[in-house]
Image: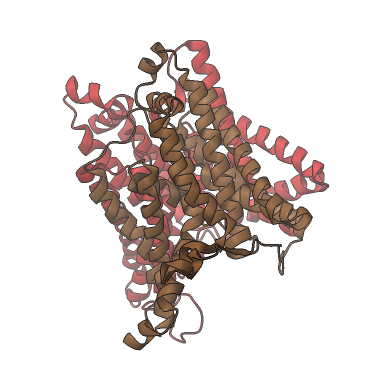
């Protein structure tokens, strides 16, 4: 056991895998943080992620992985637009609208995928994003490769975190956005248009979710499969709560989830006969425990979901 | 009585119209994608209603879990709680039913079959106990906790069928088949099992409770406005919604029980093709009305049965029906919003969900 841990690369490999798994979650959760701060909870980001993944696969096949990233973000934005039209434009229940949007995306991506790549869709290989090593930094011991030898989306995600925090908490636009999420009537009296602010925040969240789906395809899995997001969008929503609706705390929450998922690789490397399903459960179960510990002390945006 | 029938007809007209419109949009989409939409819809109708066997053994068999889970979702939402974890509770019930079905070998059928269903319902309620506790004690949104537990349940099924519950030869990722005594009786000449009776009875019971009992009134009052119900009605709203959630879990677990006892006869991964999510559409289209949910469940059962036929006979991916389901939900939401705007009041689904 100790031998396996001491073996070169196990810890580094674990950290790198944690960051790789965390990247799509971090992207989606950062976007959803912005949406939720404006008072919108969007369960449709699971569908937006899936749409982003398929759009990325299609665009990358035709025009390369960078076009794939852009197409993913655009697809996520379009999905969020449908959600915004029904939930915000018409004032329908956000949870139900989001569930319907996700359901529709599962059907639509499945049908389009089979139409585009055939019934089996097997053997689909997509041009992916290469690992970009930051000179110098990637040579740092232990964390070097985990943080600084990753594909482009990881850097985008890491850069988005401080940017989102700054925009939310240090700008006038961020203040208005949070006002829409805490007290929309009061904000309206101050000249803020909560409906418009929320729509913009939702669209930003959708674009992030689409980007998350694209990064899943282009930087993690390398192919598209039906329902491939497998609940990652929903997990991102839990991560937002875990991160107390603050991008700077959402980052460690996403990394924690990534690390819990990556644990299975370590245990495999150590040759322990622990059923892999336990590791499938672990991140979800511990997120629940963490939510119980965290939520007691914090409050969601007062007008969330209303 | 005729008034009651008229209300029911009205309740059925909306989901039927929403589904029909959804189907029209699907046909347009299929045609645009170069499929033979006419052949697809014909295969769908044939697969769902083409024969007595198709209607009972495909449509109604699929309707049973949808109705049971949908009833639970409706009850919880009427009490102001959103259960997005029907899938997980269904699987918890299925695990219990499969375990009991094997363990009760040698018991008389009149005991083994009901015990399997009872165990499944209890397991579903138990699976809901954690979200209820987290909500009451720590304020964790049940939307998130029930959702997360879906993934835990999926992994648990996988763990069970490759571990403690794996069939004796240890080759296939599934449980041993349940004992003949634990299987639900079938309607002769079909694959329709007793679960259909269970679902109808559950709907009738829920309709009675909601309409005729004090607790049913407390549920509606809690959902309509927890604060008002607590302050001026003296209703213990937290307890009412907790019980409603536990019952919702129990109904979804029961659906897992009827599926294992009446259809699958064993536990295996992918037992549910997404019943937990489709059931949300079933309940919403019926506007959370228990008897309406039976009708809406049959419509969705037909849709899913038809989708299988469509894929088999016309080569159109069956996943496309999810688009119809999503469109149907969105259409109901849009119609409700329009009605609300017209009346200037809260109405329909949104009222119960607010």
Residue B275: give x, y in percent of width and height.
50, 52
Q: Please report the residue visible at 81 percent of the width from the left and 41 percent of the height from the top.
A: B32
- Front residue of A173 and B339: A173
Name the quarter where the N terminus of chain B is drawn. top left
- Front residue of B315 and B334: B334
| Quarter location, residue B331 | top right
Residue A158: give x, y in percent of width and height.
48, 51
Task: Report which colour depicts chain B.
Answer: red
Q: Please report the residue visible at 45 percent of the width from the left and 17 percent of the height from the top.
A: A192
Task: Report which colour depicts chain A.
Answer: brown
Locate residue B80 relative to residue A26 in the image: left or right.
left
Name the quarter where the C terminus of chain B is drawn. top left
In the image, residue B101 above or below residue B224 = below
- Front residue of B140 and A139: A139
Locate residue B344 relative to residue A63 in the image: left or right.
left
| Quarter location, residue A279 | bottom left
What colour scheme governs how the chains and residues are painted in the rendered image of this protein?
by chain
Q: Among all residues in the image, which is located at the extreme front?
A: A136
In the image, residue B141 above or below residue B10 = below
Residue A99: give x, y in percent of width and height.
50, 41
Asked whether the viewer can see residue A46, the reply is yes
Asked whether the viewer can see residue A91, the reply is no
């Amino acid at each position: 056991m100790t031998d396996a841990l001491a073996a070169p690369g196990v810890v580094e490999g674990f950290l790198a895998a944690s960051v790789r798994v965390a990247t799509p979650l971090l992207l989606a959760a950062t976007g959803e943080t912005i949406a939720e701060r404006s008072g919108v909870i969007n369960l449709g980001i699971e569908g937006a992620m899936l749409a982003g993944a398929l759009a990325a696969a299609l665009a990358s096949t035709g025009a390369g992985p960078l076009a794939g990233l852009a197409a993913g973000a655009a697809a996520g934005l379009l999905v969020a637009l449908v959600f915004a039209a029904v939930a915000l434009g018409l004032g329908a229940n956000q949870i139900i609208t989001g569930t319907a949007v996700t359901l529709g995306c599962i059907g639509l991506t499945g049908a389009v995928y089979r139409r585009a790549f055939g019934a089996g869709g097997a053997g689909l290989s997509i041009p992916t994003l290469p690992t970009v090593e930051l000179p110098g930094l990637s040579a740092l011991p232990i964390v070097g490769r985990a943080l600084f030898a990753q594909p482009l989306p990881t850097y985008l995600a890491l850069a988005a975190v401080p940017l989102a925090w700054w925009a939310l908490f240090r700008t006038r636009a961020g203040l208005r956005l949070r006002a829409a999420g805490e007290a929309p009537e009061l904000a309206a009296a101050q000249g803020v248009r909560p409906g418009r602010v929320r729509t913009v925040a939702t669209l930003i969240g959708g674009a992030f979710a689409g980007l998350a789906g694209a990064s899943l395809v282009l930087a993690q899995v390398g192919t598209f499969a039906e329902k491939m997001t497998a609940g990652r969008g929903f997990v991102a929503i839990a991560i937002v709560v875990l991160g107390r609706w603050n991008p700077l705390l959402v980052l460690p929450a996403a990394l924690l989830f990534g690390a819990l998922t990556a644990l299975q690789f370590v245990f495999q490397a150590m040759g322990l006969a622990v059923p892999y399903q336990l590791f499938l459960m672990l991140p979800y179960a511990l997120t629940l425990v963490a939510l119980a510990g965290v939520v007691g002390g914090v409050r969601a945006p007062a007008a969330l979901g209303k | 009585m005729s008034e009651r029938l008229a209300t029911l007809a009205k309740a059925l007209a909306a989901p039927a119209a929403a589904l029909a419109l959804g189907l029209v949009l699907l046909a347009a989409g299929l045609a645009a994608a170069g499929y033979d939409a006419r052949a697809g819809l014909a295969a769908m109708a044939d697969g769902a209603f083409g024969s007595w066997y198709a209607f009972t053994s495909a449509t109604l068999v699929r309707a049973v879990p949808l109705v049971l889970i949908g009833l639970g979702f409706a009850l919880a939402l009427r009490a102001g709680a959103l259960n997005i974890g029907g899938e997980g509770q269904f699987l918890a019930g299925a695990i219990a039913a499969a375990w009991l079905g094997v363990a009760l070998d040698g018991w008389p059928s009149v005991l083994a079959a009901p015990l399997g269903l009872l165990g499944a319902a209890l397991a579903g309620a138990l699976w809901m106990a954690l979200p209820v506790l987290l909500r009451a004690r720590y304020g964790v949104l049940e939307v998130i906790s029930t959702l997360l537990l879906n993934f835990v349940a999926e992994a648990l099924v996988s763990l069970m069928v490759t571990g403690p519950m794996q069939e004796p030869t240890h080759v296939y990722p599934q449980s041993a088949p349940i004992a003949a005594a634990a299987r639900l009786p079938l309607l002769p000449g079909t694959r329709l099992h007793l679960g259909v009776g269970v679902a109808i009875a559950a709907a009738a019971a829920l309709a009675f409770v909601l309409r005729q009992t004090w607790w049913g009134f407390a549920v509606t009052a809690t959902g309509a406005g927890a604060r008002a119900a607590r302050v001026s009605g003296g209703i213990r709203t937290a307890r009412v919604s907790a019980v409603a959630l536990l019952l919702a879990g129990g109904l979804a677990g029961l659906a897992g029980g009827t599926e294992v006892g009446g259809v699958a006869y064993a536990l295996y991964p992918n037992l549910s093709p997404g019943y937990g999510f489709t059931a949300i559409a079933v309940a919403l289209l019926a506007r959370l009305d228990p008897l309406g949910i039976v009708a809406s469940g049959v419509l969705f059962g037909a849709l899913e049965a038809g989708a299988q036929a469509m894929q088999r006979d016309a080569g159109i991916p069956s996943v496309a029906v999810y688009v119809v389901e999503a469109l149907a939900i969105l259409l109901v939401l849009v119609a409700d919003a329009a009605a609300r705007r017209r009346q200037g009041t809260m109405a329909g689904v949104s009222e119960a969900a607010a």
